[in-house]
Amino acid sequence: MLMGTAVSLNVAMGMLLEGAKMTVVLSVLSIILGLLVGLPVAIMETYGGKVLRYMAMLYEGTLRGIPLLAIYMVIFFSMPLLTGIGLPAFWAAVIGLGMRSSAYQSQIFRSTIQAVGAGQIEAAYSLGMSKLETLRHIVLPQAMRMAVPAWMNEYVIVLKDTSIALAIGIVELTRQAQYLVSITGEPFRYYGLAAFLYLVMVLPLTYLAGALAKKYGIKGTGGTSNVRI
Amino acid sequence: MKKKFGEKTVLEGVSFSVKMGETKVIIGPSGAGKSTLLRCINRLVEPDEGEIIFDGINVLSKDVDIRKIRARIGFVFQHFNLFKHLTAVENVKIGPKVVKGLSDEEAERIAIKALKAVHLEEDAFEKYPAELSGGQQQRVAIARALAMEPDIILFDEPTSALDPQLAGEVLDVMRELARKKVTMLVVTHEIGFALNAADEVLFFYNGRIWERGEPRELLYKPKREETKSFLKRIADLSL
Amino acid sequence: MRNITAYLSVVLVVSLLLAVASSGCIGTGTTQEKVLVVGTSADFPPFEYKNASNGQITGFDIDLIKLVAKKMGYDRVEIKDMDFDSLIPALQAGKVDVVIAGMTITPEREKVVDFSIPYWEADQAVLVRKGSGIKVSSVEDLKGKKIGVEKGTTGAIYVKKHLGNSSTIKEYPTYVAAIEALLNGQVDAVVLDSPVAEMFSKKYNSVEIVYTIKTGEHYGIAVKKGNKKLLDGINKALKEIMNSPEWNKLVEKYFGS
């Protein structure tokens, strides 16, 4: 049942921008949580002993295998039933999206960590560096730089996936557009505007990725390739 | 310094020593266990049994902190293995800084001295490995080893990956080091270098020291058949 | 040094974002207030939607649940908007106390939640002018007539499907416009939601309901399975409201203008 109410562009943009703000806050917190968890998982997978490696791979595999919606459902709806501990929807969304992203980020970092040649690691050991010093001074600086394009790509995916948090009651850009469509009956206009805002959020990142690649790329190696979003 | 090995078929009981200030060259066909030997000395590869005595310390004993030993043993690789994200100076600085805990200024001073010792062109100091020629890269790698002021430097076929012309500039540096009485153990196919820089040459064959002696003695008048045919092959290749 | 600076700036950004985020999200005071937490899906006007001018979630269902809550002694209601499909899990997980979202009572849903008495029967009433002599005992009787509907409603969809070839169907942007067309004689009958039709037949003496097309769409308020105490309270309050003048005012507010 559509109401056909007219909404001024100012009001509509206000609603959409409010949604976009939530989209940005949610995605930034999630990508950072994903980094803080994903990087150690990647290190465990590449440097850990058998047990750690197995645990990390189990973690990564599980989270990559479950749809985000199901992760949300488990965190937001099932956990309170099982444990009696409930999280506010916002934090459930950050944790769900962040953990899912951590699995993908660990994959990114695992491959770039492995891309740092064994020869350089032997060279570092030969100087007398410990495993940890080698990781910190030799492996991670290179792995992180090589990861920039894929990481930016991952951020865009996280940004777009924030809309799935609607399932647990997060009102972000897509939801605000739905509100507008339902009261005005103009899907083309408002979903179009929302799509435009997503684009506005994503496009600068493409340039940022390029700039970062230029600034932090390993000179002369072409180590940071083009960014595909 | 004494070393004994026994590792499967790669090294079948090898024993020799290197004195301070000596340059020892190891030659031999590929697969003879030369690289493995070098890697065992600083335990990049763990030997199965035997002992390595370095300055009176048994490197293989459990209560030795291998990192402290490695800091005193330089290693120069066939493929340079420079740190790609660091400039030439930074590559040389990082050892003294991270391992020895020297200040940035002190490490910088040592690095520049080491780079000058290998005659790296000044305009290459701030360049990244990918921007340097192979010869420059290997000289930076030697400087990186020198900056740690090691008691010995191990060279693992340092010129095999280089064109003859670039190999020349690396060999010049190595000859200079030998003259300065830097202790070196060098695995190489460069017979010329062995002739005029080595105190002794070891011929490795089938994981053993097949023959050893003064450079001129061994290279001009080898006693065993395997040594002769190896030297002949090397000579044919270089002609 | 650069590593430490980078690390510190990350920490700073994270804590700032946490602060920004939490200021908007955690603020549930621990007063003794009695709050009814209501789940809805605010994209179904006029039952529940976002009022663009004040940003509030509003609608027929929202006003109704506020009335119910007030009658039951709650101090206020807290509205939680989410995806329609998440409403029942939210109820089961205890994230919300009740769900009101134009939710049709179905046997499948009744297996997992308990429903109140229907508060809205979306049966389609046939409204005609009094004394027009139009008699309807089945949908067939509307053939050849001019029928008015509100665009996009269940009624509009129904008549287009069943009478689209045989009758003239006129769509109007609102119910009121359709009723006005009926009063002016531009159409012979209007097909619309029963509760709305009842409201209009009381408001205008000149129109009457002559037939009801049963669609079986009855909306109910859902509570967690087995929460009998809450359900009884809701049913009691609903009955009181539906039998009071408040009900007609509510229907008129959302369907009559």
Image: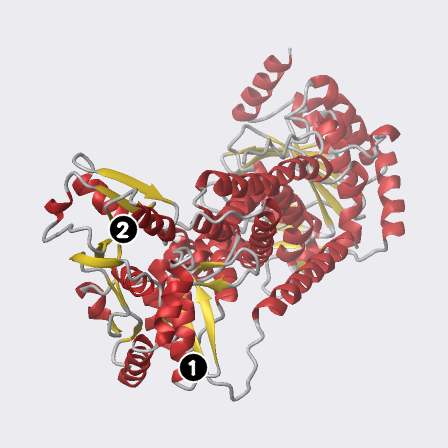
Residue at the (87%, 46%) spot, across then down: B108
Q: How would you rate the neighbour count of disc 2 (Cα within 10 Å): few for under 14, some for 14-19, many for 20 or more? A: some
- Relative to residue C35, is residue A20 drawn left or right? right
Name which of mark 2 and mark 1 comes first in the sequence: 1
Q: Are marks 2 and 1 in contact (CB under 8 Å)?
A: no
Secondary structure, mark 2, is helix
Query: Where on the picture, by quarter, is residue B89?
Result: top right
Q: How would you rate the neighbour count of disc 1 (Cα within 10 Å): few for under 14, some for 14-19, many for 20 or more? A: some
For residue C101, say whether it is visible. Answer: yes
Residue at the (60%, 62%) spot, across then down: B61
Percent from the top left, x then y, of residue B210? 55, 34
Task: Name the chain under label 1.
Answer: C
Q: Nearer the viewer, residue B181 or C28?
A: C28
Q: Are the residues flagged by discs 2 and 1 from a single subunit?
A: yes
Q: Amino acid at mark 2?
A: Thr
Query: Where on the picture, by quarter, is residue B101?
Result: bottom right
Task: Name the chain under label 2.
Answer: C
Secondary structure, mark 1, is helix
Percent from the top left, x then y, of residue C243? 29, 77
Alpha carbon separation for disc pair 2 and 1: 31 Å
- Relative to residue A115, is residue C230 drawn left or right? left
Residue at the (18%, 60%) spot, across then down: C216
Q: Which residue is mark 1?
A: C70
- Relative to residue A47, is residue B179 drawn left or right? right
Q: Which residue is mark 2?
A: C154
Q: Nearer the viewer, residue C142 or C230?
A: C142
Residue at the (68%, 53%) spot, across then down: A129
Percent from the top left, x then y, of residue B25? 68, 34
Percent from the top left, x then y, of residue A197? 58, 42
- Return the mark for residue B172: none
* Image: A120 above or below B161: below
Q: Amino acid at mark 1?
A: Lys
